[in-house]
Amino acid sequence: MECLLPESLDISTVLDATTQYQEWLATHEAIHLGADNVARVDAAGIQLLSSLFISAKKNQRTIQLLKPSDVLLEGIETLGLQEVFELNLKSESNPND
């Protein structure tokens, strides 16, 4: 299932996002999240997104973050959640790359 994350992943959108994420999990399909439009994030938004990933994995569901924006990547890295999202960010890769 192709899904698009909203432009804003922050405390003001957590309630609506929770409902949306539950609907995505209820489909029992692989979830591919388009994340290139995300322009604003905070810890609450990233925490909820990480909860979606953890829930999907616990239920043996395929979930993937597609084209995450720089803002989203920075937030994930700041919170140290790269492993949850299965991301290999610059700070973890070979500096000669």
Image (cartoon, helix red, strand yellow):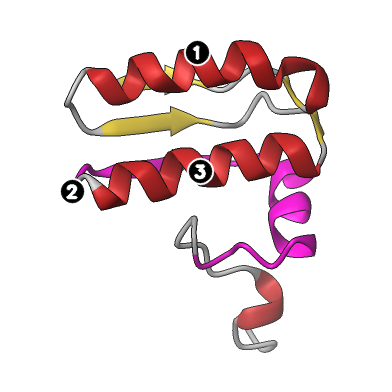
Q: Which residue is mark 3?
A: 51
State which tag comes first along the sequence, 2 or 1.
1
The image position of residue 9, as x and y in percent, is 72, 27
Please tell me which residue is depicted at 70% across the width and 28% down the height of the picture: 38
Per the image, label 3 sits on a secondary structure element best described as helix
The image position of residue 49, as x and y in percent, is 56, 38
> Magenta stretch containing residue 49, yes or no?
no
Q: Quote the CA–CA distance across marks 2 and 1.
A: 20 Å
State which region is magenta.
60-83
**Quick check: 42 above or below 11?**
below
Seen from the viewer's position, the closer of residues 27 and 34 is 27
Q: Which residue is mark 1?
A: 19
Q: Which residue is mark 2?
A: 60
Q: Quote the CA–CA distance across marks 2 and 3.
A: 14 Å
The kind of residue on which mark 1 rests is Thr
Seen from the viewer's position, the closer of residues 51 and 70 is 51
Q: Quote the CA–CA distance across marks 1 and 3.
A: 13 Å
Please tell me which residue is depicted at 61% across the width and 88% down the height of the picture: 94
Q: Count of labels shown? A: 3
Tell me: 36 left or right of 28.
right
Per the image, label 1 sits on a secondary structure element best described as helix
**Quick check: 94 above or below 44?**
below
Seen from the viewer's position, the closer of residues 52 and 71 is 52
Per the image, label 2 sits on a secondary structure element best described as loop
> Magenta stretch containing residue 72, yes or no?
yes
The kind of residue on which mark 2 rests is Gln
